[in-house]
Image: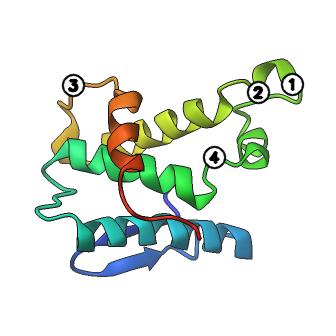
Amino acid sequence: MTSGGFSLEHGVVICFNQVSTYTEVENTLLHELVHAYDNCTVKGMDFYNNCAHLACSEIRAAAMSGDCDMMREVFRGNVGLNPMGWAGLTERCIRRRAILSVDMNPNCTSFSGPIDLDAFTHRAESRPMSKN
C-alpha cells in the first residue's frame, strides 16, 4: 500500500484513499518532501533510473519522516511489546522500507541488493537537511 509519492511531473501526491489520520498525512507529506528536497538539491538526481539515488533518498525519507517510529512499527506487526526485540529497530525499519520502495521501481528489479545501509547512511547523513 502506497500512501503517497513524488514525481517530477506531479510533485508531491498524497493518496487520500490510503491514509486515515492526520498523522499519516503528515508523515507521508514529510517523507515525500524529503524526496522533493533531494531532487532540487542533488545535481543529476535520477530516482527512476539510478537505483542508488533512489535508495539513498528512501533512507533519508524513512529516517526523517517518522516512518520508523516505534509505535508505527508495533502497529505494523514488525516488533512486539517485548523490549528484547527493540534493539536495532530503527535501522531494520529504515532498511526494510528502503528496500520495499526500491523494489517498487520497475527500473530497479535487477538492483544488486541487499542495500548497504551503512554506505548510503553515510552519504545521507552528509546532506545538509535537519529538523532544526
For residue 68, the mark is: 4
- Mark 1 — residue? 83
Q: Earlier in the sequence, mark 1 or mark 3?
A: 1
Select label 3 or label 2 by which is in front: 2
Is residue 21 in sight in this rendering?
no
The amino acid on which the numbered mark 1 sits, given as a three-letter code, is Pro
Could you give the CA–CA distance between mark 2 and mark 4, rounded to whole angstroms? Answer: 12 Å
Labels 1 and 3 touching (C-beta < 8 A): no
Mark 4 and mark 3 in contact? Answer it, CB < 8 Å.
Answer: no
Helix, strand or loop at mark 4: loop
Q: How is the structure coloured here?
A: rainbow
Are dots 1 and 2 in contact, CB under 8 Å? yes
Residues tagged 3 and 2 counted as in contact (Cβ below 8 A): no
- Residue lying at the far bottom in this picture: please name it: 10
Q: Residue lying furthest right in this view?
A: 82
Q: CA distance from mark 4 to mark 3?
A: 24 Å
Front one among 76 and 47:
47
Which numbered disc flags the more N-terminal residue, 3 or 2? 2
Whole-percent x, y for residue 103 in the image:
33, 39
Left or right placement of residue 76 versus residue 92 in this view: right
